[in-house]
Image (tube, rainbow, N blue to C red):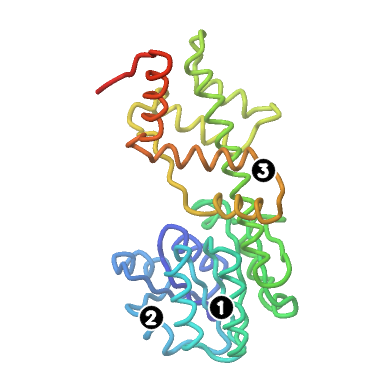
Amino acid sequence: MDIRIIGLGKMGLNLAYNLLEHGYNVSGYDQNSTVKNEFEQNGGTFYSSFETLMSDKKQPSVVWLMLPAGEITNNQVASCINAMDKEDILIDGGNSKFTDSQKNGEKAKEKGIYFFDVGTSGGTSGAREGACMMIGGNAEKFEDIRPLFEAICVKDGYLYCGPIGSGHYLKMIHNGIEYGMMQAIGEGFNLIHHGEYDYDLPAVAKVFNNGSVIRSWLMGLTEDLLQDDPNLNEIEGVIPSSGEGKWTAEEMLRQELSAPVITQALLTRYASVDKEKYGEKIVASLRNQFGGHEVSKK
């Protein structure tokens, strides 16, 4: 099977190595040519441009995108569709919004190209050693590429979800849950950190992760980071938000359902990047106005 990966960043490169290790022929393209030597030393074939990557592809082929969600991916999908042949397979393995995948799938279908939206979880180590993947697309055509997912995913770590969009929809909800779980861990350890007892925080994370109800990979990662810097003195408490939590909250509102934990986790991320704290200044000033409460000044 001829597999061509566009986007050899941390996820794409590790996915490529996973595929190579399982005997697949893998070619790749990335704007950052510094990965060329490493990629080729590990058995891949690096192309310096999208045009050359597509010029000698075999038919049918699999073109696999591992790019940031949004305009970058959508533009690359359009370019791929124009350069691909009927019966080729185009996979978006990034964190695209499911509605974008639905639109991209329709465009691919018009050209006779099979589009699959693949939500990918497990981080860089999962991409390298065994990922978790949620797959949307044509059910019959999926059977042609099922062995690929059996090879590169952990046992029971892939799911054919249904039509185009269903893979990225499920990954969106997965990431919303992830937001809430991380928020709970952060809040709990914040209480422990400020509490009256002098706990060994890495040891706390370790015992939580061995036999307790809340044991998890995230708790193991918490132990690792606390071993390095228990007080997190080198970390600025800014939490970027890449989009999936927002889309999950939007879906909650669309369905008029309730997801307060996920939503609050998202709002906490927004608050963390607001260094101006203008709203908080308003509240502090109002308390001073009506109650004479002291206002802290710089």
Residue indicated by mark 1: 90
Above or below — where is 226 with respect to 240? above
Q: Return the mark for residue 50.
A: 2
Q: Which quadrant of the rendered structure holds the N terminus?
A: bottom right
Task: Look at discs 3 and 2 and give the one toward the viewer.
Answer: 3
Residue indicated by mark 3: 259
**Viewer-side residue, 54 vs 181:** 181
Q: Residue furthest top?
A: 196
Q: Give the SS element for disc 3.
A: loop
Identified at 49% across, 53% down, the residue is 124
How far apart are labels 2 and 1 at the CA level? 14 Å
How far apart are labels 3 and 1 at the CA level? 33 Å
Q: Amino acid at mark 3?
A: Ala
Q: Whole-percent x and y of residue 146?
A: 69, 71
How far apart are labels 3 and 2 at the CA level? 42 Å
Q: Whole-percent x and y of residue 24?
A: 55, 73
**Viewer-side residue, 203 vs 250:** 250
Identified at 53% across, 81% down, the residue is 2
Above or below — where is 294 with respect to 96? above
Q: Amino acid at mark 1?
A: Leu
Q: Amino acid at mark 2?
A: Phe
Identified at 32% across, 78% down, the residue is 48
Q: Earlier in the sequence, mark 3 or mark 1?
A: 1
